[in-house]
Amino acid sequence: MSNEKNHSPINGYIMLFLLLALLIGGVLLLRIYVGAFMIVAAVLLIPGFVLVNPNSSRVLLLFGKYMGTIKQNGLFWVNPFYTKKRISLRASNFDSERLKVNDKLGNPIMISTILVWRVTDTYKAAFEVDDYQNFVRVQTDAAVRKLASMYPYDNFADEGLDEDITLRSSVNEVSDALEKEVQERLSMAGIEVLEARIGYLAYAQEIANAMLKRQQATAIVAARHKIVEGAVSMVEMALTELSKKEMVTLDEERKAAMVSNLMVVLCSDKDAAPIVNTGTLNH
């Protein structure tokens, strides 16, 4: 529950006019005690002026007691004995350092996050935590570490996993989970999370080369699988068309030889060098 309350200060321009009137009157009546009293009163009024810029606020304390928060923009005057603490209400960016953590599979990865946040409750930001800006940094790093341990970096067939969400491919889902986790941690400080997303993601240096080779091998196997599927379809189509049009009659041995030759040509990673037979089928 929020304990923030709005403070309604006195218009600063009215008090500024009064201050000038006291100073002028004090100078004119300086020879009598009234003039000195007016000058002293004017000096005491000066610390009460407070300027609040757009998207900024001032938290007011009177000898340790919370008196309220000024969120209006302009020049105001408050009790000169108030302690005035400035808290920005603007949106702020936080780009965390790259952290070395383990993903769900235990692989070391490097990860960082970009966070956009702002203060919505000045009471909580000022009094519920010691330093709300440092609180944002520490809790964001903790949330990123937890998030990284919940999902694998990527899916690999040999791991026996079929994860729908991975850190590398599921950008929107991971960002939503990160935003929710960070918001839960920062709500006690009166902070609203506007956006949270992964800013940097990569395998740690000690396994980066091995994982790159692994990804390349997985891609090669997948490509070969597609090539073999296509080659089998093409060989089947060729045999079917030859049989349908009765262009040539092949026994089982010659069919096997033809299939073998076509599979070699279609599946080879290099251009085939055909040998032209100018004789008969048997020579």
Image: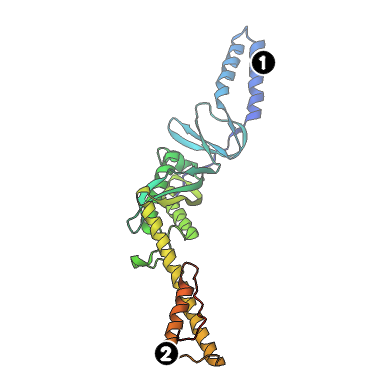
Q: Residues within 10 Å of mark 2 (few under 14, many from 20)?
A: few
Q: In this view, does 158 lie above or below 139?
A: below
Is 190 situated left or right of 38 in this image? Answer: left
Is 191 situated left or right of 157 in this image? Answer: right
> Nearer the N terminus, badge 2 or badge 1?
1
Q: Which of marks 2 and 1 is in front?
A: 2
Query: Along the line of sight, which residue is nearer the eye, 159 or 113?
Result: 159
- Quarter of the image holding residue 13? top right
Residue type at mark 1? Ile
Q: How crowded is mark 1: few (under 14 residues within 10 Å), some or many (20 or more)?
A: some
Q: Residue 165 carries which label?
A: none
Report x, y in % for residue 95.
48, 44
Query: Along the line of sight, which residue is nearer the eye, 202 or 132?
Result: 202
Is mark 2 in CB contact (under 8 Å) with mark 1?
no
Q: Residue at the spot x=32%, y=56% of the render? A: 106
Report x, y in % for residue 229.
46, 76
Q: Is residue 28 above or below residue 88?
A: above
Query: Along the line of sight, which residue is nearer the eye, 69 or 253?
Result: 253
Residue placed under numbered mark 2 in the picture: 252
Separation (CA) of disc 2 from disc 1 = 119 Å
Report x, y in % for residue 143.
40, 50
Q: Can residue 151 be seen in this view?
A: no
Report x, y in % for residue 255.
45, 86
Residue placed under numbered mark 1 in the picture: 24
| Mark 1 secondary-structure assignment | helix
Quarter of the figure with the C terminus: bottom left
| Mark 2 secondary-structure assignment | helix
Residue type at mark 2? Glu
